Image (cartoon, coloured by chain):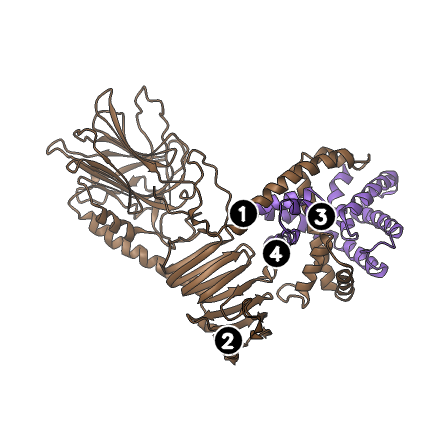
Amino acid sequence: MKNEPFEHQEQLARLVAAHCDETITDEEFAQLEQLLQAHPEARAFYRRYLNLDASLSDFGRTETSGWSGQEQAKMVTPPQSQARSLWALAAGVVLLLALGIWWSQQQAPRVITQNPAPAEDQAKPADPGVALLTQVVDVEWIDEPMVTGASLPLGRLQFASGLMQIEFFSGAIVVLEGPADFELKSENHAVCRQGKLRAMVPPEAVGFTIDAPTVKLVDLGTEFGMDVAKDGAAEVHVFDGKVELHSPEDQPQMGIERELLAGSAVRIPSKGKPEAIESMPDDFASNAQLEKKSVLASNKRYAAWRKVSERLKADPRIRHYYNFEDADSWARKLRSHLPKASKQDGAIVGCQWTEGRWPGKGALEFKRSGDRVRFTLRIPKEPAVHSLTLMTWVRVDSLDQRFNALMLTDGSAPGKPHWQITKKGALELGLRLSSRESTVYTSAPILRPGTLGRWVHLATVYDGTGRTVTHYLNGRQVSSHPLTSTIKLRGGQAQLGNWGRPHKTDKYPARKFNGLMDEFAIFSEALDESEIKKIHRVGRPQSARMTAKVNRKKTTD
Amino acid sequence: MLFTHEEPALRAFVRSLLPGWHDVDEVMQQTGIVIWNKFDQYEEGTNFMRWACVIARFEVLKYRRSKARERLVFREDLWELLAEEATDSAEVLQKEREALDECMQKLPDTDRALVGAAYAHGTSIKEVAESAGHSATAFYKKLHRIRLGLLGCIQRQLVKEGT
């Protein structure tokens, strides 16, 4: 019964579950008996379901109690009684907790503004989503933008144009084309107020439901298309299997109840009778097409970035520029892309080459404690440099250390910059003023557990003329600090992703960065917000594969 | 110990023939005792699981007869059929149970907690759900959906492993 669902599958599944949970009525039990008696495939399903039920009960035991010893003893001596009631009690508490989590999830209106876990706590928060966003192509968002890989909480998705793929945790996959107004109601239920979608529903997600303004669609394990116009009129096209159509819950009198089979299509206008129309499978983007579009879009973005990268190389204000391109896995030199190049190349120590923001783009992975890129930070003594802009694209995988290096000069001589991320996820620029005094400019925590694992653009501007230090995340200013004192900036031996020679007295000598880096630039001038925004915009990875893990919240404050 | 190893499979077998966990526990206990007592009759080298199934089946039958007038007991002919087929598919079912591990890993944390709690607590999900102020129906529905998801996952897992 693989691709051909058993015709009474839904009824059977419901009955078997009720039997399993001992909630079955006498009448239902008789129906179950009948189905089982008559259909070998029904018995096969029954067997598999009960087999799962039994293994889950084993799981339940080991999960909530250190059961194993008792389990063996049980075979020879009467078990039950004490042990069982004890862990039944404990399990009750666990269940209440689980129910609490689950119900609060069901009722959460929209969890985009979920409270971040305290930044000190690096444990990943429990994932409260009902679906994953697995492709995003050319989407023009109406509300908060989301990236590929984001987990989608209950709530509304609105976008003006573009395509996206949503994978419900039930197993149903929806490719949705904008303009769309779509709302996730559960892991197997959504509301489509507007938009064009194609849904692929595997047997385990049978019952997948979409509510449109003029129709309620319940899927019976199939592939179908639905197009909901702005005025609510809906078209339903069935490509495979069948679906059930019902009147919308608020207009039960519409009387459109029917089953729709593969190859047929129907149009339900906002007023008037539904009419049969020709089925147009090619009108609805499939996930294969989406995949292709996504690759094309990603190539396009990569090409656009390369163009800007060329321009940056020629920018007179730039002092160091590594774009991590033309990498081959044996290269132990990080090529600098400035005209008077050679002396500015970085020496790669450890660090594996890997893929960056787009397929084909190079990046370095900092994983082991020795991994680093050594280079000489060139800041001329004359004329004195008063301003500096540091900029990089990184994927931070975790913040293990008290300080996690982006670019640190060796030692701690006065005037030498230390650019790093704190354990709490704050961006920090430190400068020693004298042997005893130093000054540190720290943003609020901006890299949260939810931001880890995805590509971000980080920039810090030290503006000696405007007397401010400003930190940026993804082109957006996150904090600005008045300069506490001015000092002549100095260069020297420096490292990307690690720290060379910690000061003897330093309490935190280990500062290794954990993650990937695929672009790094230093300007000897202060870039303004609009310029940083522009550089970020053209470098955004967008739908480049599943580089992202979670993105639930805008990181401001 | 041979039997400890086979016990989950046997439990699953018994489970498919009886309406509730309480019944399963009782029969399993009895079956365990019989297996111990008859262990010298088992022929080394033959299929142990099959042998144990025969014993368990007989115990279920005895138990069933004692409860024959209770509701929710399958008709005898259907019951025979189920027992027969379950014995024959013991190996496939074993594979499915093994594949479950992987699938449990993939389950969202809250779902896993729900499953763990639901099963650990055995029969009184209803009371707990209701004492938490929510309908047991919603809870069962959710549980059912998780189970269907797991079945799908198991199927994919087995296809992937090429079995």
Q: Amino acid at mark 4?
A: Gly
Instruction: Please state the horizontal and vertical placement of residue A165, each as a whole percent of the image.
Output: 45, 59
Between A346 and A307, the one lying in front of the other is: A307
| Amino acid at pointer 3 | Ala
The chain coloured purple carries which letter? B
Q: Which residue is mark 3?
A: A54
Whether residue A430 sits left or right of residue A51 in the image: it is left
Q: Which residue is mark 2?
A: A268
Three-letter amino acid code at disc 1?
Answer: Ser
**Which residue is at 40% across, 35% downward?**
A399
Q: Quadrant of residue B156?
A: bottom right
Mark nearer the N terminus (2 vs 1): 1
Query: In the picture, which quadrant includes the C terminus of chain A?
Result: top left
Percent coordinates x, y for residue A84 in the rendering: 74, 37
Q: CA distance from mark 2 to mark 3?
A: 45 Å
Instruction: Select label 2 or label 3 by which is in front.
Output: 2
- Residue identifier under label 1: A104
